[in-house]
Image (cartoon, grey):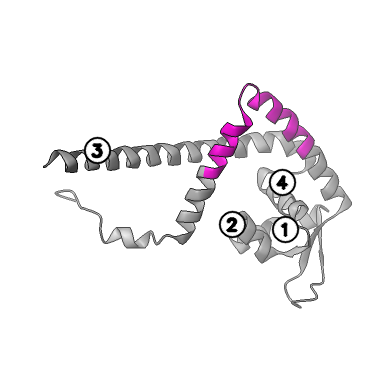
Amino acid sequence: MSTKKQVAASAQAHLRGAWSGLVIEVFRINGELLAAGDTLVGDLGLTSARWQVLGAIALSPVPLPVAHIARNMGLTRQAVQRLVDEMRADGLVRLEPNPHHRRAMLVVATERGEAAYRVAIERQERWTDTLAAGLSPEAFEAASTLLREMRERIERSEPAAAIGTRTQTQGA
């Protein structure tokens, strides 16, 4: 193999290793964030998942149906529907008629849901102040930019195409 090909192969291996390392850290931080979120908001009648739904509602300029909340959160409609049903039973959200679609009701936070969300955000901000102490906003912005770019690339990708091109090891 020529030196040029060796350098290219080494660079490709380095990139693959860096990507794998990032993916593993994202999986780990996801688990840690979910567990920490559950701890932060458990006494408010929330879980991390319920908090996410309230956040999607709070951050939207208009009421949304379950399918739009799910799409915005990157979750399945069925998962969000289950959460909304539970949250409705607990008085955190209510459903309102959708003038654009008779069957797709709009999900709206109740006063209780809004209050729980406000307290959750206050707690998150205090926790963030502790976690982020000594780190720069630019570091978080750079990380967000990279993660957003990778999420967008994943959304546009066709992972099934890689199945036909992978090499198989002997005996596999």
Between the residue at mark 3 and the residue at mark 4, the CA separation in whole angstroms equals 43 Å
Q: Which residue is mark 4?
A: 51
Between disc 3 and disc 4, the foreground one is 3
Query: Is residue 114 found left or right of 21 in the rendered image?
Result: right
- Residue 84: numbered disc: 1
Classify 10 Å Cα crowding around label 1: few (below 14), some (14-19), many (20 and above): many
Q: Mark 1 or mark 2: name the one nearer the start of the chain.
A: 2
Q: Mark 2 or mark 3: name the one nearer the start of the chain.
A: 3
Query: Is residue 166 found left or right of 130 in the rendered image?
Result: left
Between disc 1 and disc 3, the foreground one is 3
Q: Quadrant of the N terminus?
A: top left
Between disc 1 and disc 2, the foreground one is 2
Amino acid on which the number 3 mark rests in the picture:
Ser
Q: Mark 4 or mark 1: name the one nearer the start of the chain.
A: 4
Between disc 2 and disc 3, the foreground one is 3
Residue 144 on image: x %, y %: 57, 42
Q: Which residue is mark 3?
A: 10
Q: Is residue 129 magenta?
A: yes
Residue 155 on image: x %, y %: 49, 58
Residue 85 on image: x %, y %: 73, 60
Q: Secondary structure at mark 2?
A: loop
Between disc 4 and disc 1, the foreground one is 4
Residue projecting furthest to the right: 111
Q: Which residues are magenta?
A: 121-145
Rendered residue at 81%/59% (across/down): 108
Q: Are marks 2 and 3 in contact (CB under 8 Å)?
A: no
Q: Mark 3 or mark 4: name the one nearer the start of the chain.
A: 3
Residue projecting furthest to the left: 1
- Residue 75: numbered disc: 2
Amino acid on which the number 2 mark rests in the picture:
Leu
